[in-house]
Amino acid sequence: MNPSNTKPLSNTQRALQELRRMIFTGELSAGSDHLQTELADQLGMSRTPVREAALILDRQGLVALRPRKGVRILPVSPEDMSEIYDILTELESLAARDAAHRDLTETDLAPMGDAIDRMEDALAHHALEDWALADDQFHAELVRLGGNRRVRMIVGMMSDQVRRARTVTLYMRPLPTRSNRDHSDVLDAIRVGDGNRAASIHRAHRQHAKQVIIDLLEQHRLHCI
């Protein structure tokens, strides 16, 4: 795409992008409270786009809007992650089954294969942040190829919270070689139209990831991230 044809971000989009970055990096720490005027000053913009961005983040479960107290950055507890992973497991497994039954072409599946290749390359170079980005791509493609708009919407609402927990634990966990292998097996099952196998592999994959994250959160007492 020609950069000159790219539509510039609105002030609300810019505020949302920057607030998300500050939350994920810990610049806005879990449990902290911030007046919208304070955030607007930090971002160098008016209160209106900050307020609109905060409403979006509130719906996504990243912050809570509190009357007269501004914005509270929400923590994620092991209990939160357990519930979120259980929901994601079922919805993404459904997406895997549906994708396998849609008679997708190699062109359709190419972005998933590309994500797996990037994950393998990232692990070979111990570039865990690059691995995490490629992992996000794989899961987003899996849900998209399932073809259910409501599944995409619900998964999108919860994925940010999983990403927050993974960011904190990324360098504490063993190298995620099993994750790469699971993704390849899911793609193979989708490619041959075996929906039950695709769903079964993905369910086991997500449940394993859930236990790794929760164990690390509890072990290191990372209830606020």
Image (cartoon, helix red, strand yellow):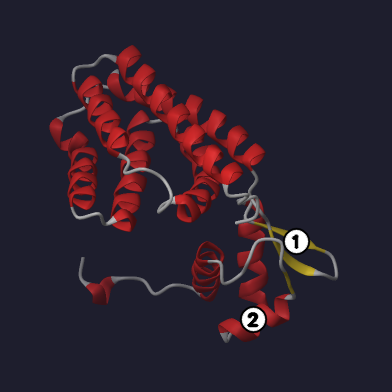
The quarter holding residue 36 reads bottom right
Q: Residue at x 15, y 37 (%)?
A: 107
Left or right position of 58 against 168? right
Q: Position of residue 93 (x, y in %)?
A: 42, 24
Q: Residue at x 51, y 62 (%)?
A: 24
Q: Is residue 222 above or below residue 204?
A: below
Amino acid on which disc 2 is placed: Ala
Amino acid on which disc 1 is placed: Leu
Left or right position of 118 against 156? left
Q: Residue furthest front?
A: 219
**Where, quadrant-wise, is the N terminus in this rendering?**
bottom left
Q: Residue at x 63, y 73 (%)?
A: 50
The residues tagged by marks 1 and 2 sit, at their Cα atoms, a distance apart of 15 Å
Q: Position of residue 147 (x, y in %)?
A: 38, 31
Q: Is residue 171 above or below residue 3?
A: above
Residue at disc 2, secondary structure: helix
Q: Find disc 2 in the rendering and name its residue.
A: 40
Residue at disc 1, secondary structure: strand
Q: Find disc 1 in the rendering and name its residue.
A: 65
Q: Residue at x 57, y 82 (%)?
A: 43
Q: Residue furthest left?
A: 106
**Where, quadrant-wise, is the C terminus in this rendering?**
bottom right
Q: Residue furthest right?
A: 68
Left or right position of 213 against 79? left
Left or right position of 138 against 92? left
Q: Position of residue 67 (x, y in %)?
A: 84, 65
Label 2: how many residues lie within 10 Å, few (<14), some (14-19) or many (20+)?
Answer: some
The quarter holding residue 73 reads bottom right
Which numbered dot is residue 118?
Answer: none
